[in-house]
Image (tube, grey):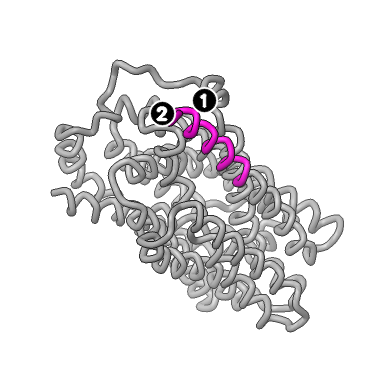
Amino acid sequence: MFQLLLTVIYVAFISLGLPDSLLGSAWPAMYREFGVPFSYAGVISMMIAAGTIISSLQSDRLTRKWGTGKITVISVFLTAAALLGFAASRSFWMLCLWALPYGLGAGSVDASLNNYVALHYASRHMNWLHCMWGIGASFGPYVMGYVLTGGQGWNMGYRYIGILQIGLTVILMLSLPLWKKREDTGNVVEKDSSGKPLTLKQIVKIPGAKEVMVTFFCYCALEQTTGLWASSYLVLYRGASAESAAGFASMFFIGITLGRALGGFLTIKLDNTQMVRIGQGFILTGVLSLLLPFGESSSLLGLIFIGLGCAPVYPSLIHATPSHFGADRSQAVVGVQMASAYAGTCLMPPLFGLMANYISVMMLPFYLLAVLALMAVMHERLLKEVSGIQTSICL
């Protein structure tokens, strides 16, 4: 039963990735149809992220009440409904309306599933599960590129993925007895009703909490900005077509996927801190490659390297949460980490959209470099805070 549940969690992570890359790959075609500036993708992204922030902050309370299994089913269904709503949208304001359930569906399940895996599975599974997310995220742009090339329109891309999400919802519903059996055999973190959920004020006061929040903010700002604006960067600066740019942008997500598949094996020898630092080095290499004057080829190489670098950062940071902050506080801290991550998703891609509008889309590599530098500094400060606490406890 334990292994069957792990298989279900793998499926759930695929469902998490499927919608994440659709907007970025479809937007070069969408904004012309709606007659809005291309920077308005940031508005949609911001609204989706706002929903995820709200639901992430409630993840500790909701998971204690309903359990990870039910939260996963409800959240995936909300996301599926929102995708079908996107497919049916005929105006920009309708996209904004459907962006709300889109975001609400993503936040709680992300925080709840990630904490569940961090508590119950080894680091290699965290990397491989996030590799499944990468498979879903890589599949989305391919579907969108296929329908655009075939002349079906971006709506069909959203429709196909929405139907697939409905199917995944059914699978997850059938798996609910597995979650209940697992909880009944000792998932004390979820079943502990004696401890009250921590408030945001209490979480922020935990040593290292502020640093990890900024680290997650920067990571998701970098990942989402790359995923959202890579296609536009290739079209508007490198001169690629919208169809080929959608396929090229998927290289970023393929890099994440391959990196996490490999990362699962590397964690046998390397710890979470080493994995994060290696990832940051690859990101730096990829961003610098975007600056090389070799047209589409250097941009393609850069996106792959950025994806490879992003691969170990997110799962390694999450998996380290129980050891950094304690198993009893991990769900609350993971929820705040997710909220911070989506705050980065909410604020930073739209900010780059404004920069692209008023300066140039060619600023993308410099923007990513600045975010990467802040992430690296805050991660090192986090390690210093946590090591200080652990040393004092040992003494």
Task: Give the number of marks.
Answer: 2
Judging depth in this view, the residue of 366 and 93 nearest the camera is 366
Q: Is residue 55 visible?
A: no
Q: Residues within 10 Å of mark 1 (few under 14, many from 20)?
A: some
Q: Is residue 119 visible?
A: yes
Q: Is residue 382 above or below residue 315?
A: above
The x and y percentages for residue 31 are: 67, 59
The x and y percentages for residue 383 are: 56, 42
Region of the chain picked out in magenta, as a range: 379-395
The x and y percentages for residue 80 are: 40, 49
Which residue type carries mark 1? Ile
> Which residue is denoted by mark 2 in the rendering?
329
Judging depth in this view, the residue of 174 and 162 nearest the camera is 174
Which quadrant holds residue 153? Answer: bottom right
Give the residue at x 47% y 34%.
390
> Which residue is denoted by mark 1 in the rendering?
203
Q: Residue furthest right?
A: 359
Q: Secondary structure at mark 2?
A: helix
Which residue type carries mark 2? Arg
The x and y percentages for residue 365 are: 73, 64
Give the residue at x 54% y 72%.
251
Which quadrant holds residue 28? Answer: bottom right
Judging depth in this view, the residue of 38 and 307 nearest the camera is 307
Determine whether label 1 and label 2 are within 8 Å by CB: yes
Q: Secondary structure at mark 1?
A: helix
Dominant secondary structure of the residues highlighted in magenta in the image: helix
User: Is residue 271 covered in magenta?
Assistant: no
Q: Is residue 249 above or below residue 371?
A: below
